[in-house]
């Protein structure tokens, strides 16, 4: 089979879907690989490294030859325009928050496969779980960014010039990214505490040498599929108030809380920020245009409060470690691709739970159960639909289906452009 790797066009995106090592593996499995010139440049992987691995380095207009186009993010309008009916595109397409893109790909007759929809609990899907691989990188980098911005030491340091006490780090949200942030902050020598609204994470937190904080005002908010549900307004207010005391006692706070399909929950209020000592640092991995885990955070920006607290809005942390992130992503996407190849061609077997979980469009239709499913091939898409996505609809595959939809807490139906968990 012939597969192609495009150059990413997302803002600031440095990752690439296949690294040369992954190209060599696909070549030895008998596949042909086309790589758009410059595709690996952001991850410091020059065209020659791809040629040496057996790829053909080509211009963008030559990618239409391929049966499958591999990418990290979503295709832009120009890339969709160069795709041909019957071609497949693999990427983290975030279709639940951008159903307009799904309609456009269906209209183009493209089979769209979204890695961010992988049914993560299937054991055969583990090597394909790009959300996990990228969240691990983001969690690691968040701790490193926090340490770099903090004007004191993370470890206990005893020197002739004095003794430095270890930094007190608080991690809020202990999913994949949070646990990696805890492990990294611990390895840097910090004293780490952590909190999650799913109390079952306590054992994992403690196994990393951190202290789990239990709030008395909020009970478990475990939703379905291992995810959290959105809190009610009353629960959220109680959580914010009780967390404020803990936040005040820490030097560094790293927030990673997400609820799939919802705006990130706000955990740190401006009142809590006022109680922090000057020089404290927060890294908000939930930072988004509509607000994040920390009040006042902005993606890609560092905001300094009046009392000297730095709020760093994380923005695509995996892209800042493009070489490592691409290597892991390449293994994820190669595993999914080869899983779906049967007898040398891409086989879209929607009877397979894994395949049905990731295929968004096929044969001119949006086929994913979590998106509207027209019985006929979709009508032409208005360009404006891409800018203003519809809300995610039904939810057979929505991991947040255990959420309390009546609460409205932290929800931004129809207006939340953030993917459920990226990062
Ligand atoms: P996520 O990115 O959706 O959320 C990050 C964390 O934020 C979660 O732990 C969540 O409980 C927490 N959170 C949400 N709202 C909160 C609030 N108001 N206050 C405090 N914390 C809040 O999560 P994730 O990292 O994608 O992981 C979600 C789950 O999926 C975990 O249980 C993880 O173990 C599981 N998982 C399973 C597999 C597998 O089975 N192979 C793979 C990956 C992840």
Image (cartoon, rainbow, N blue to C red):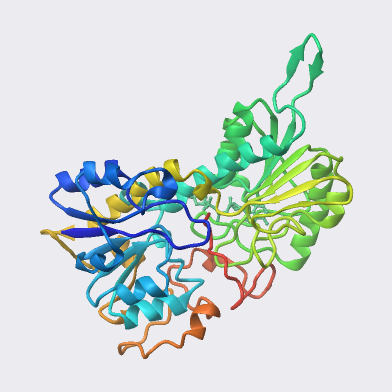
Q: How many labels does the image show?
A: 0
Task: Please report the residue visible at 62 percent of the width from the left and 37 percent of the height from the top.
Answer: 144
Residue 101 occupies quadrant = bottom left
Task: Please report the residue visible at 48 percent of the width from the left and 56 percent of the height from the top.
Answer: 13
Q: Is residue 25 left or right of residue 368?
A: left
Q: Which residue lies furthest to the left in this view?
A: 343
Q: Position of residue 275 (x, y in %)?
A: 88, 46
Q: In this view, does 298 lie to the left or right of 370?
A: right
User: Closer to the camera, 183 or 318?
Assistant: 318
Q: In this view, does 385 lie to the left or right of 303?
A: left
Task: Please report the residue visible at 72 percent of the width from the left and 59 percent of the height from the top.
Answer: 266
Residue 208 occupies quadrant = top right
User: Closer to the camera, 351 or 319?
Assistant: 319
Q: Position of residue 153 (x, y in %)?
A: 73, 27
Above or below, 207 relative to 368:
above
Whether residue 179 is visible: no
Task: Please report the residue visible at 63 percent of the width from the left and 38 percent of the height from the top.
Answer: 143
The quadrant of the picture occupied by the N terminus is: bottom left
Whether residue 224 is visible: yes
Q: Where is residue 35 in the image (x, y as percent from the top left)?
A: 28, 55
Q: Where is residue 117 in the image (x, y as percent from the top left)?
A: 41, 62
């Amino acid at each position: 089979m012939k597969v192609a790797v495009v150059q990413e066009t997302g803002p600031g995106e440095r990752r690439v879907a296949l690294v040369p090592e992954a190209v060599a593996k696909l070549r030895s499995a008998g596949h042909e690989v086309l790589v758009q010139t410059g595709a690996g440049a952001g991850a410091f992987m020059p065209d020659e490294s791809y040629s040496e691995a057996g790829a053909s380095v080509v211009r963008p207009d030559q990618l239409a030859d391929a049966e499958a186009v591999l990418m990290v993010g979503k295709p832009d309008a120009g890339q969709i325009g160069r795709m041909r009916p019957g071609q497949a595109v693999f990427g983290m397409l975030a279709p639940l928050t951008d159903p307009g893109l799904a309609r456009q790909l269906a209209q183009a007759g493209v089979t769209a496969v979204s890695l961010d929809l992988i049914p993560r609990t299937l054991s055969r899907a583990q090597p394909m779980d790009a959300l996990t691989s990228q969240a691990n990188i983001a969690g690691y980098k968040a701790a490193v960014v926090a340490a770099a911005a903090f004007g004191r030491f993370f470890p206990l340091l005893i020197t002739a010039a004095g003794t430095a006490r270890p930094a007190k780090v608080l991690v809020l949200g202990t999913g994949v990214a949070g646990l990696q942030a805890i492990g990294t902050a611990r390895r840097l020598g910090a004293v780490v505490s952590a909190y999650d609204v799913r109390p079952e994470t306590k054992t994992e937190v403690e196994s990393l040498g951190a202290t789990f904080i239990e709030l008395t005002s909020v009970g478990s908010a475990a939703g379905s599929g291992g995810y959290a549900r959105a809190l009610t307004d009353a629960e959220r207010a109680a959580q914010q108030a009780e967390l404020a005391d803990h936040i005040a006692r820490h030097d560094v706070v790293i927030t990673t809380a997400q609820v799939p399909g919802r705006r990130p929950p706000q955990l740190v209020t401006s009142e809590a920020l006022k109680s922090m000592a000057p020089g404290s640092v927060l890294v908000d991995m939930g930072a988004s245009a509509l607000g994040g885990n920390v009040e006042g955070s902005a993606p890609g920006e560092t905001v300094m409060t009046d009392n000297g607290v730095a709020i760093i809005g994380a923005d695509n942390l995996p892209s800042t470690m493009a070489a490592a992130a691409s290597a892991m992503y390449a293994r994820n996407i190669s595993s999914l691709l080869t899983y779906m190849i049967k007898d040398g061609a891409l086989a879209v077997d929607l009877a397979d739970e894994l395949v049905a979980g990731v295929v968004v469009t096929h044969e001119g239709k949006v086929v994913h159960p979590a998106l509207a499913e027209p019985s006929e091939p979709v009508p032409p898409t208005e360009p404006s639909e891409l800018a203003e996505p519809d809300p995610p609809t039904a939810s057979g595959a929505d991991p947040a289906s255990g959420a309390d939809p009546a609460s409205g807490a932290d929800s931004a139906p129809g207006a939340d452009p953030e993917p459920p968990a990226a990062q």
